[in-house]
Amino acid sequence: MNNNTILKYLIVATSILLAAVAAFFSITGLAKLFAGSGTSVLIMASTLEGSKLIVVSYLYRFWEKCNMLLKIYLIAALIILMTITSMGIYGFLTAGYQNTKNQYELANTSVISYQNQKNTVDSKVLSLENNIKSLNERLTNLNTLRNNAENRVNKSFDSNRFSQSKNQTNIAKNIDADIKNVSDKIDNLENQRLVLMDSSSALNLKITQTNLENVGSTELGPIVYISQITGFSIDSVVNFLILLFILVFDPLAIILLTLYNKMVLEESIIVEENKNTIPETTIEPKSEPEIEPEIKDPLQELEERIEKDLPKPEPVIEPIVQEAPKTKPKTNPLPKLYSDGR
């Protein structure tokens, strides 16, 4: 199996796999869209997906034999089937995105609610801290006034001004009452501030736990990051990605199937050409068998050389002797005379 054959099988396997996955997404999306007749939609969409692949192969192989009306209809049907498949894929992917988005928005709503509560608590804590700060300043001023009044009382006793010392003593008592009142307010506000700070810490902990438990934020993390960088909304970014999936999903399966048919046709053409061409046969001349030289005896070679060097004897001409003609012998007639026995 050569590399072209392996590539051909890989192309057709990938094309069928892409078409099968696209058909699954499309059928699932259409079944969700027409939930009332899911089984019928499943059968119809499966048949249409299979017929789409057959139409692609038929158009490529028999393009020249089809008339114009058939070509127009098959191309229009192919485009409509691709559109239906794309719509099913779009519905399937958007449904999955909506589920994830709902989880993400629900978690975000909880986080926003906790964050608003925390902001309210933090603002109260800040207000209490400002009040405590102002009361501390007032307490400092009261302590200063009391110290001054106490000094005046001491000076009045030293100078025997008992009436003045009595007045300063009353002023000091009033300042002590104010100091106690301000101190009690500061303590009360400090207790409230501590309670609110505990509430703020608890809300901050809930926000952290909600973000960690939010599966949608984990799945949509890259999309949220892209949305923040580009300035587009999350829905716009997801819609753009889904359109990219649609553009390369079903069309790629059809193109790969077309390439497979092209490779098959080219191979069949090459096979036909090889059958039609008759190879020229060349008749090679038969090679004569090589005669191995005979190994001669040295004495025999020497005798042959001597015979070649000796002069040839002249031929002896023998005399031609003519033979006498043979004559029939003469017969004696006498025996005939005495042939009767006498």
Image (cartoon, rainbow, N blue to C red):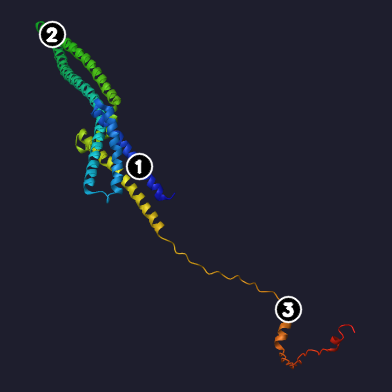
Q: Earlier in the sequence, mark 3 or mark 1?
A: 1
Q: Earlier in the sequence, mark 2 or mark 3?
A: 2
Q: Earlier in the sequence, mark 2 or mark 1?
A: 1
On the image, the x and y values in percent for residue 236 come to 20, 35
Q: Which residue is mark 3?
A: 298
Q: Is residue 63 above or below residue 146?
A: below
In the image, what residue type sits under mark 1?
Thr
Asked if labels 1 and 3 touch by Cβ distance under 8 angstroms, the answer is no
In the image, what residue type sits under mark 2?
Asn
Spatial CA distance of label 2 from label 3 is: 166 Å
Q: Is residue 55 above or below residue 138?
A: below
Q: Secondary structure at mark 1?
A: helix
Q: Which residue is mark 2?
A: 174
Q: Secondary structure at mark 3?
A: helix
Spatial CA distance of label 3 from label 1 is: 85 Å
On the image, the x and y values in percent for residue 75 come to 23, 44
In the image, what residue type sits under mark 3?
Pro
Q: Is residue 175 above or below residue 227?
A: above
Pick the residue in front: 159 or 187.
Answer: 187
